[in-house]
Image (tube, rainbow, N blue to C red):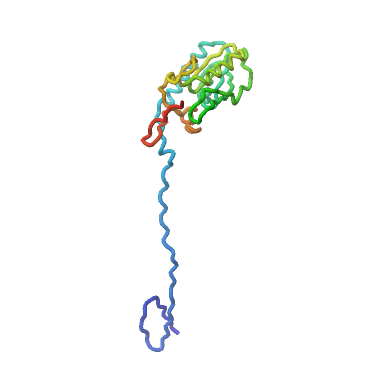
């Protein structure tokens, strides 16, 4: 028996032939739509960093600071104390460029108050691992602004009777000074802007940048105001 499949259309057949109607059901499936391109990282679109001090300038100045420090203490072992976390990069490169015997240690402090405004009160969160009594100590800071943290550290260290106590800072913001402190070795004096990179952070980001830059925030990528 010959069978002719029909799909919605009739056709006359010769006598003696049998017609069978077969319906083809619609699946209801649609062609998949192309996925839209993912938007760019929202954080990246709201933030930019403008280079303030290039990596080359940083390294050149750190070499000069290392020479100045060793010239002041030509024959003495030097003990560098870095303030975590921002000062680690500076300490590492500074230590590498100082000839002679150099050791180092770390300390951590925090200021507390409101979320964006420091009360000026500082507390110790990590102490040194070894005594500094009788040692030539260089306090290594990433940035000196209000001076409240440095004032606290100098008082603390002086009580521990080092032979010499000096301060080296990579960046100095004299406009922000509140406490009557100063650094003996200064890398760069900078304007009162919020800076990141080379150890300095914003919400724990940007520390790994090999340069120091000014953080710009949207909309319009305005400068982030320096912390109070």
Residue at the (51%, 29%) spot, across then down? 114
- The front one of 113 and 133 is 113
Specify the farthest residue to the right: 130
Q: Quadrant of residue 104?
A: top right
Quadrant for the N terminus in the image:
bottom left
- Residue 3: x and y in percent read 43, 81
27 up-or-down from 100: above or below: below
> How many discs mark residues in the rendered view?
0
Q: Quadrant of residue 222?
A: top left
Seen from the viewer's position, the closer of residues 144 and 1 is 144
Residue at the far bottom in the pictured view: 16
Q: Whole-percent x and y of residue 152?
A: 55, 19
Image point (41%, 21%), residue name: 190
Residue 74 image position (x, y, % from top left): 54, 11
Q: Quadrant of residue 225?
A: top left
**In this view, 143 is above or below 220:** above
Camera-side residue of 136 and 108? 108
Q: Position of residue 156 (x, y in %)?
A: 59, 17
Residue 44 position (above or below residue 15): above
């Amino acid at each position: 028996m010959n069978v002719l499949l029909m799909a919605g259309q009739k056709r006359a057949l010769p006598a003696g032939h049998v017609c069978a109607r077969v319906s083809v059901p619609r699946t209801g499936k649609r062609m998949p739509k192309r996925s839209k391109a993912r938007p760019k990282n929202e954080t990246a679109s709201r933030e930019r960093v403008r280079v303030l001090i290039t990596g080359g300038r940083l390294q050149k100045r750190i070499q000069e600071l290392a020479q100045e420090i060793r010239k002041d203490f030509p024959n003495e072992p030097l003990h560098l104390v870095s303030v975590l976390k921002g000062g680690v990069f500076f300490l590492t490169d500074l230590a590498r460029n100082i000839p002679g015997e150099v050791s180092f240690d770390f300390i951590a402090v925090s200021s507390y108050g409101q979320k964006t405004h420091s009360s000026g009160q500082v507390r110790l969160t990590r102490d040194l691992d070894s005594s500094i009594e009788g040692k030539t100590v260089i306090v290594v800071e990433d940035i000196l602004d209000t001076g409240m943290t440095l004032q606290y550290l100098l008082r603390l260290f002086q009580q521990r009777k080092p032979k010499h106590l000096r301060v080296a800072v990579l960046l100095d913001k004299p406009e922000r000074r509140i406490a009557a402190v100063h650094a003996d070795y200064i890398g760069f004096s900078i304007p009162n802007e919020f800076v990141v990179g080379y150890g300095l952070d914003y919400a724990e980001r940007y520390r790994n940048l090999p340069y120091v830059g000014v953080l710009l925030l949207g909309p319009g990528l305005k400068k982030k105001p320096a912390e109070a």
